[in-house]
Amino acid sequence: MTGTLTEIISENAREAQLWEPIDGYRVRCLACGHRCPIPVGFSGVCKVRFNREGKLYAPWGYVVNPLCEPIEKKPFFHVLPGALTLSFGMLGCCLHCPYCQNWVTSQALRDPRAVAAPQAADPRALVEDAIGLGARVVVSTYNEPLITSEWAVAIFKEAKAAGLATGFVSNGNATAKVLEYLRPWLDFYKVDLKSFDDKRYRQLGGRLQPIVDTIVRLKEMGFWVEIVTLLVPGFNDSKDELTRLTDFIARVSPDIPWHVTAFHANYKMRSRGDTTTEMLVNAADIGRSAGLRFVYAGNLPGCVGDLENTRCPSCRSLLVSRYGYVIRQYRITSAGACPSCGTQVPGRWSEHFEPQVTSVPFSPRRRRGLDRMA
Ligand code: SF4
């Protein structure tokens, strides 16, 4: 694709499905919790959805940096352990976190240093590539997928027709409308719950309440949900905040897996120290005290003992042993139960464990789906 990012975003768009008219001049976008009112000729907070002649337009027809990854990297630990995902992103986000790990894609048009190269793509060819590579799941990630939901659904329709599962890796700043729109085509939803303090969320460009509402709705609507919290020292790691955060998750469901992961200096947040093993373990203890039955510590493989593994919530038998993204042992039965005591383990499990295609991310070798529309 050639041209400036502004030109690419303007040209690679279709009339959106998640909007409503306000008056003859403004429309309201319904794709995320900001619910932006957008006058003709302007874009919303995310910079990628815009009002052209009284209609809302949304990104279409491209992907950025597609990658094959083990599903553990997303992280999903209770979904098809060891499965390969084909992960794709687009451009833009409704938040502007100073420690974003995907800022090159998410902060496009907001930060002049964020220069990612979109590639033209076709949904069916992309899914054919995923199957050819051995992927069992297609995941919308890297930018905020809610703001590009129409394009994700176009790909997910093809994925589901081909027998693949689908996932979102999202900040959770959703509306009821976008979740209803996604529900027929989306199986697994990971929410990045960044804090339990509204003041912190406002620093990131959002509010806490829409994220809380999303998590409740996702469970009510039957999505498989896992939650991750990047533990940023001095930002969201106080005992009080973590207690309120994990109490909330446990009230929604003690069976929601909670991943507390280690922060490393990144993007605009470079002067803060990294999360230590002790900090992660202490946070995990708070989660377990709140009643969460599946608590995991991430980004420090081999340092957190049993906090990378899945154990039976009843008899504590080891069910899945992990090292980073490597599955070392898998003992869940074909019925999704503990082989020792028969307790059902919440999640979406394979009938039979299939060997991992990879435990490290790689670029797709075959690019047919990405080149067909280029
Ligand atoms: S996706 Fe969110 S930020 Fe973007 S225009 Fe819609 S409501 Fe605004």
Image: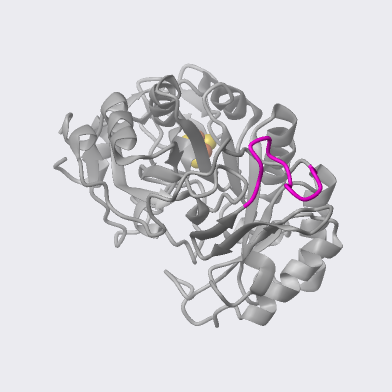
x and y percentages locating residue 13 in the rendered image: 31, 28
The residue shown at (84%, 52%) is: 314
Can you see residue 104? yes
- Residue 141 image position (x, y, % from top left): 44, 45
Query: In the figure, residue 296 lies in which quadrant?
Result: bottom right
Left or right position of 241 against 58? right
- Is 70 or 240 nearer to us in this picture? 70
Residue at 26 percent of width and 31 percent of height: 12
Q: Is residue 272 left or right of residue 87?
A: right
Q: Judge from the rendering whether residue 280 lies leftward or rightward of residue 170; answer left or right.
A: right
Residue 363 on the magenta segment = no
Please tell me which residue is depicted at 36% across the width and 56% down the height of the picture. Answer: 361
- Residue 212 lies, in percent from the top left, at 72, 45
In this rendered view, identify the residue nearer to me: 37 or 127.
127
Name the residue at 37% across, 43% down: 88
The C terminus lies in quadrant: top left
Q: Quadrant of residue 205?
A: bottom right
Q: Main secondary structure of the magenta part?
A: loop
* Colour treatment of the image: one colour
The answer to whether residue 362 is above or below residue 48 is below
Position of the N terminus by quadrant: top left
From the top left corner, tell me how far across and down residue 146 is, in percent.
51, 37
Total numbered badges shown on the rendered structure: 0
Viewer-proximal residue among 315 and 162: 315
Magenta residue span:
331-343
Instruction: Using the rendered image of the protein, determine whether residue 61 is visible from the camera's viewpoint.
Output: no
Along the viewing direction, whichever of 219 and 159 lies nearer the viewer: 159
Q: Is residue 80 above or below residue 323?
A: above
